[in-house]
Image: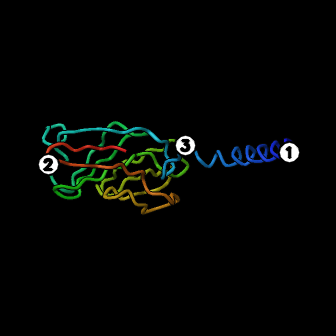
Amino acid sequence: MYRSYHIYYCALLMLALALLPGCRKTQPGGVPLVPVDININVNNPAYADLAVPGGWLYLTGGSMGIIVYRRTNTEFAAMDRHCPYQPNELCRVFVDDSEVIARDSLCCGSAFLITDGSVTQGPAALNLQRYNTSFNGTVLRIYN
């Protein structure tokens, strides 16, 4: 009787150990999970580029920096600048002259819309990592 319980518990332990790697948290988008909780007053002159819809700017934070884009008077999008294609290469996207596309031609060879982080040119198959935003009319909070 003892032997059958012992075999049962050993089998259960091996199954649990085999499934354990599946419990690790991964960041959707392939970039490292970095805590983000940033508050900015959009009326501050330092953030003047966010004063009107269509404006954008870079912020320090996230894995490789953050692009913040003002979609409407009350809605913002915030994306990590870390290219999700081969994230171990540490490629960073930059907003190009169109001011609508963020790209990295030399490292990850991909391009993304700054309005939502979606891929416009591969080889990246994943969008830029998005962060949550909330806006109370003055303060924009960017968080995960």
- Using the image, tell me which numbered label, if any, was put on residue 132: none
**Mark 2 highlights which residue?**
137
Which SS class for mark 2? Answer: loop
Residue 52 picture location, percent across and down: 15, 53
Residue situated in front as seen by the camera: 1 or 105: 1
Of badges 2 and 1, the one in the foreground is 1
Q: In whole angstroms, how far apart are the C-alphas of marks 2 and 1? A: 69 Å
Residue 2 picture location, percent across and down: 84, 41
On the rendered structure, is 79 left or right of 31?
left
- In this rendering, the answer to whether 47 lies above or below 105 is above
- In this rendering, the answer to whether 108 lies above or below 113 is above
- In this rendering, the answer to whether 27 lies above or below 125 is above
Q: Specify the amino acid type for callout 3.
A: Glu
Q: Specify the amino acid type for callout 2.
A: Gly
- Using the image, tell me which numbered label, if any, was put on residue 89: 3
**Mark 1 highlights which residue?**
1
